[in-house]
Image: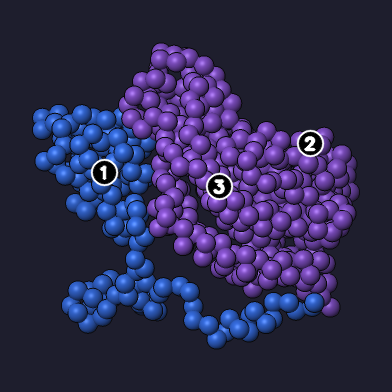
Amino acid sequence: MTNSKQTTKTTYQLPIGPIHPALKEPVMFEFEIEGERIIDADVILGHVHRAIEWTGMRRNPIQIIYLAERICGICSFVHPFAFVRAVENAVDIEVPERADYLRVVHGELERICSHMLWAGVAAHEIGFDSVLFLTWEMREKALDLTEFLTGNRITKGIMTIGGIRRDITKEHLPKINETLKYLKDNFEKLRKVFLDDKTFIMRSKNCGILTYDDALKLCAVGPTTRASGVKKDVRVDQAYAAYSDLDIKHMTPDILTGEVNGDVYDRIIVRLLEVKQSIELIEQAIDQIPAGDLMSEPKIPKLLNYIKKTPGEGIGRDEAPRGEVIHYVKFDGEHEQPYTWKVRASTYNNILPWIPMLKGEQIADIPIVAASTDPCMSCTNRVTVIEKNKKHILNKEELHQLSVKKSRRLMK
Amino acid sequence: MKLSMLPQVLSQMFKKPWTNQFPAKYTPNNTTQFLKDVEAGKAKIKPPIETPKGFRGKIKYDKEKCIGCKLCIRVCPCEAIEFKEKEKKIKIYVARCCFCSQCNDVCPTKCLSMGDEFLLADTDKHSKNLIVE
């Protein structure tokens, strides 16, 4: 916000950020605004550092699993998943086949919860709050199942190095089948509301477009890139765990509509298709699950001593609900703490695509476009509009009201 | 369809709410007074939903079985366990516990287990209720 910039330009600037507790990576936006239109957007990263990696380098791998779980509240299974895959890769630990299947079940269950949460938030952003309650009612059922299987609703605490901590037994099956049946029965209702309703079509079609070329060039990941027609999915491309045995393909919007636009509407389609795919994947995994051990080494002190003695470095990748997650771990063979631990979460890649998406849109579209990449929550907590050195503060509530007003205006 | 949510919203009006209204149906005007009334038997607390099997609540510690091997201290992710040198026993600060039950898995004598209790809010993190020894 330099003064010299202000005097030479007729447009005004609108900064958003940098502190947003809802975001995994706190981020700051600077918009160039002409009237209502965004003509340029800039993203500034790296404001808050929680030192999770530093803390991890002073703890042993078993302790880090629970630290990795807390990188993100919604991806609380995929982060430890990527971390244990990195450790397994670094020190050569074979995972039993049954554990691989159980990991798929929990990973897909988390994807259902995450996409449902996202769908509700997206509806809320455009002021359609009755849909928020419909989707979160369905999500609640999926969370109940998570609690039943793992003992916790959000931070599952079920992952361990070389396997998984809890089994799915016969007594769990009726509840799993009941929940999956409920989700399938209600899925059609959700599909109708999201894809056929006038309000959604008005606000999401041709809004926040990310082209195929931009998606490739900016390395977008997850549903954000698949909605632009890029066939990128770690589960298919480099199948890990039990995904290679299951029937899975890239979910792109042309499966349903026959065309790819890369707009917010397409991102809704991709996420809904993925919810359906996840339900099918859980069913397949439960059907095909082989008998066997849960962990390759149930004695934790023995496992820790083995990791302490073995030098090596490894990479763990996996497909989180928001896209690819990468963890890098290096052990020096003398300490049980890792020598290095590096995390790359998926939202990091999905931040730059915001720039082409937001160019040409209105201020009222910022919440839905920003939310369409699923950055956990709308990042519009506190907005300052600076115009001729006058300061107006737009808080999240007012920005949300602007968005609601636009929906109402379009309805008329 | 223009108002695809309308039938759903209308049917919702006649459905019972999903939420279990714990601890009372309506928020009491004065919480401390409400708790006093409960103690005196004038008011009743609506019970919470039963926890599922395998739920991880407040930790239980069987002091007699403990051999003081310190393995739980080695794996505890939040460093909630303290070793008492003199007695060779452990002390668990529940306020720090993240309820992962990793110490239960590693314990060679199985003297630790997870309970069902989850109402652990307190103004003092060192209160008697939040320290297990």
Co-location on one chain, circles 2 and 3: yes
Q: Position of residue A248 (x, y in %)?
A: 69, 46
Residue A165's place in the image compared with A405, above or below, is: above
Closer-to-camera residue (A123/B75): B75
Return the chain for callout 2: A
Q: CA distance from mark 2 to mark 3?
A: 38 Å
Task: Look at discs 2 and 3 and give the one toward the viewer.
Answer: 3
Q: Position of residue B125 (x, y in %)?
A: 28, 49
Co-location on one chain, circles 2 and 1: no
Which residue corresponds to mark 1?
A: B93
Q: Quadrant of residue A245?
A: top right
Q: Which chain is purple?
A: A
Q: Position of residue A38 (x, y in %)?
A: 84, 51
Q: Which chain is blue?
A: B
Closer-to-camera residue (A1/B66): B66
Q: Quadrant of the N terminus of chain B?
A: bottom right
Which residue corresponds to mark 3?
A: A288
Report the disc number at residue B131.
none
Sequence order check: which comes first, mark 2 or mark 3?
2
Q: Are marks 1 and 3 in contact (CB under 8 Å)?
A: no
Which class describes the residues within 10 Å of circle 1: few (<14), some (14-19), or many (20+)? many
Tell me the SS state at disc 3: helix
Closer-to-camera residue (B57/A371): B57
Return the chain for callout 3: A
Q: Position of residue A278 (x, y in %)?
A: 63, 53
Question: Visible in this render: residue A280?
Answer: yes
Amino acid type at circle 2 is: Leu
